Amino acid sequence: MLRAKTLLTGAEIPTIGLGLWKSTADSGVKQAVKDALDAGYRLLDGAAAYGNEKEVGDALKEVFDEGSIKRDDVFVVSKLFQTHHVWKGDTSRVTAALNKTLSDLQLEYLDLYLMHWPFAFEQIDVSSIGGFRLADGTPNPKLNFEMEYKETWKEMTELLKSGKVKAIGVSNFTVEQLKDLIENVPGVKPAVNQCEMHPYLSQPELRTFCEEQKIVMMAYSPLGSGDSYSGKSFPEVGTGPFQTPSGGTTLLQNSVVKGVAEKLGKSPAQVLIRWSLQKGLVCIPKSTKKERIGQNGAVHDFEISKEDMDALEALNCGFRYGIGYSKGHYDCPNAPWFNK
């Protein structure tokens, strides 16, 4: 099993990294970064929207100053949030966002810069309107937004010329959006598409398209989730849309996942991460606990059989934990507009 995948740029991205979403200063994100690097991780997946880039930057500076790990040893990912897409011809927001991220991370360049979502917000400061979502996940009615990614992608390609980013990609893009981007903005193709991916949401059509286009897929929420805006943390038992006969529990408690784990003598989390690797994905599980970070990275000494991979694939029912911003993009039972 390869421990790195080659991007369209020729650079190599490690197949396992530390996801930094929901990791805060209070939950110990700075120490988590240091623990992950100490455990052998060489990929960090962050974003401006996570609100922790200063803490991540402090951790990186301390590690690099110690000298045992160099900047070139670590593949650092960040993301351009919707607040800084091109809006009504204002292209300056893209570069401003990158410069802020580099300043917070105390870095001269990013290995990969992703467009976080295919939407643009008019407001740069969403806190002034009370945030960009209501409690149930509905976009804030005060938020002015639209689907926009092509003009922003053009500006991101310009960032490559500055040397401040080594590769660019997207996140949360569908097959249709990827086709539109590739066909209508010729030139630089996305090196990566980062999306939610796990056995409840294996997205075979998207994976096949990206493989054909040589776009590396990164899997976020590879262990599923214990929460969501709607409160639904697992698909219902059944055979209808967004249901599976083996549903009714979170992925970590799912009987099929636990059965494979028991057979292999591994944890359910390790099985889910290994599933991602055997699907050809880059996997970015998140944790701030040292023991769990180490355990999540220890998945190269076993393989899931074809029979068990098929059983895990049978869990796929299109169930999402993350939601988009409007009907037609990531519709699912967790979306507040579902069935409306």
Image (cartoon, helix red, strand yellow):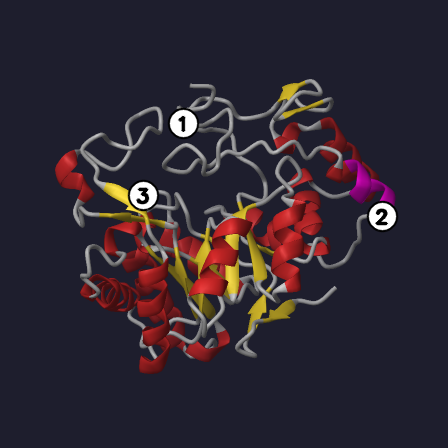
- The mark closer to the camera, 2 or 1, is 1
Indicate which disc, 3 or 2, sits on the residue closer to the N terminus. 3
Q: Is residue 339 above or below residue 23?
A: above
**What's under tag 3, amino acid-wise?**
Asp
**The N terminus lies in quadrant:** bottom right
**In the image shown, does 312 or 86 lie closer to the viewer?**
86
- Would residue 239 be found to the left or right of residue 108 on screen? right
Say which quarter of the image contains residue 101: bottom left
**What's under tag 2, amino acid-wise?**
Ser
- Would residue 233 be found to the left or right of residue 119 on screen? right
Circle 1 residue: 229
Residue at 39% across, 46% down: 23
- The mark closer to the camera, 3 or 1, is 1
**What's under tag 1, amino acid-wise?**
Tyr
Label 3 element class:
loop
Residue 189 placed where, x, y %?
Answer: 49, 69
**In the image shown, does 280 or 257 lie closer to the viewer?**
280
Q: Circle 2: is it few (<14), some (14-19), or many (20+) Cα within 10 Å?
A: few
Residue at 52% across, 50% down: 176
Q: Main secondary structure of the magenta part?
A: helix
Residue at 27% across, 59% down: 54
Say which quarter of the image contains residue 218: bottom right
Q: Residue furthest front?
A: 184
Circle 2 residue: 305
Q: Which residues are magenta?
A: 305-311
- Would residue 326 be found to the left or right of residue 317 on screen? left
Is residue 180 something that shows in the picture? Answer: yes
Question: What's the mark number on residue 26?
Answer: 3
